[in-house]
Image: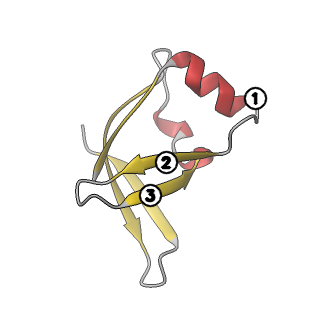
Amino acid sequence: MFNAVLSTEQCLSYYSGQIKYVLVTADSGERIQLHFRHLQPFIDRLGLRGRFRLTVSKQGAFVRLEKIN
């Protein structure tokens, strides 16, 4: 699990294609690089704010991202 906060301006940098990945730090201390497209469903007019649960396969591949609050 991790928290993520991006301002509207930061989100625009991703939408414009200038930046493709978001780096977050999980509660465990692990650094996780996520492709921006996985976060897009959670963006609103204020940007991105929330707590998320990431599910990965045994091989470490992305399976699902859920917003938990």
What percent of the width, then of the height, locates residue 7?
48, 20
- How dense is the environment of label 3, judged by Cα within 10 Å: few (below 14), some, or many (20 and up)? some
Tags 2 and 1 touching, CB below 8 Å: no
- How dense is the environment of label 1, judged by Cα within 10 Å: few (below 14), some, or many (20 and up)? few
Lateral position of residue 2 relative to residue 9, left or right: left
In the structure shown, which secondary structural element does the residue marked by tag 1 occupy? loop
In the structure shown, which secondary structural element does the residue marked by tag 2 occupy? strand
Lateral position of residue 30 relative to residue 48, left or right: left
Where does label 3 land, which residue? Answer: 32
- Which residue lies at the image location 57% right of the left edge and 24% below the top edge? 10
Q: Looking at the picture, tell me which residue is in the foreground, 9 or 65.
A: 9
What percent of the width, then of the height, locates residue 5?
39, 30
* Amino acid under disc 1: Ser
Where does label 2 land, which residue? Answer: 23
* Amino acid under disc 3: Ile
- Which residue lies at the image location 46% right of the left edge and 35% below the top edge? 42
- How dense is the environment of label 2, judged by Cα within 10 Å: few (below 14), some, or many (20 and up)? few
Q: Looking at the picture, tell me which residue is in the foreground, 19 or 53.
A: 19
Q: Is residue 51 above or below residue 44?
A: below
* Amino acid under disc 2: Leu
Separation (CA) of disc 1 from disc 3: 22 Å
- The tag earlier along the polypeptide, 2 or 1, is 1
- The tag earlier along the polypeptide, 1 or 3, is 1
Separation (CA) of disc 2 from disc 1: 18 Å
The disc placed on residue 16 is: 1
Observer-side mark, 1 or 3, equals 3
Tags 2 and 3 touching, CB below 8 Å: yes
Separation (CA) of disc 2 from disc 3: 6 Å
